[in-house]
Amino acid sequence: MKDANILADDEEQTSTRASRPGVERARGRKAGEATRERMLDAAEALFAKDGYHGTSMREVADRSNARIALVTYHFGTKDTLFDKVVERRASYMALQRIRALDKARNRAGSDPIPVKDLVEGYVLPFVERSTNGGQGWKNYSLLVARLANSPDGAKVISDHYDAVARQYLAEFRRSLPQAEEETVYQAFSFMVGAMVGLVAEPGRVENLSSRRFVTSDLLRAYANLLPFLVGGFDSLPRHS
């Protein structure tokens, strides 16, 4: 009869053999996820720099040090890859904006939400990530700015941003009951344009002022943008 130590060793070895396939599968999944993220990072940088039509799947493969067959395996087509690039950070942005909106609703109670809170809740998360989120978020911000001014981006922006935008628009309309409805929609579009313009061209003020003023600090520039946007909403034409 085996003694207790031998039995324990046998059980441990059996357990290790049984668990090894599961461990290997977990490692494989982790490696696959890392490869997928590397491809998304590469595609994000290329789409931001060269646009959808200026980027090929082969370039994404080369930049991510992967075979093109592997890029195709993970994403299928360039359309799907493009959509996943936008979706990845749009999901985070939607969460932050909804959290800000929920907090504003709680503070306001049954009253309309102050316009300043609505502008801040929508714009600040984007500017903050562009500033503090590292190179990936800088690339993504440039990509969103490119898409906001291109017919190529209309569908993908609509798919991933419109649901949250409509919640904010409903609150803007409630907070500005005297404003023409059409002008509220236009003002929201102007706000988004100013937001993406801020992160896409931080050097514009330097050039116009012959470098007397530096606006590389986006959060400082945002502090000036906020009252400008709030004033614009508050000045919308009223119902006749």
Image (tube, grey):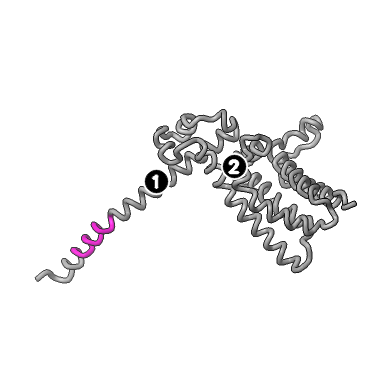
Residue 26 in percent (x, y) is at 36, 52
Q: Earlier in the sequence, mark 1 or mark 2?
A: 1
Q: Are marks 1 and 2 in contact (CB under 8 Å)?
A: no
Q: Secondary structure at mark 2?
A: helix
Magenta span: 9-20
Front-lying residue, 135 or 152: 152
Image: 43 above or below 33:
above
The CA span between labels 1 and 2 is 28 Å
- Quick check: is 175 in the magenta stretch? no
| Displayed quadrant of residue 97 | bottom right
In percent of the image, x 68 and y 51: which residue is there? 165
| Residue 11 falls inside the magenta stretch | yes
Circle 1: residue type = Ala
Residue at 82%, 50% in the rendered image:
233
Quickly name the residue at label 1: 31
Q: Nearer the viewer, residue 4 or 15?
A: 15
Give how far across and how far down residue 84 sits, in percent. 52, 43
Instruction: Place residue 192 in its image quadrant.
Output: top right
Horizontally, residue 211 falls left or right of residue 84, namely right
**Numbered disc 1: secondary structure:** helix
Q: Which residue is mark 2?
A: 156
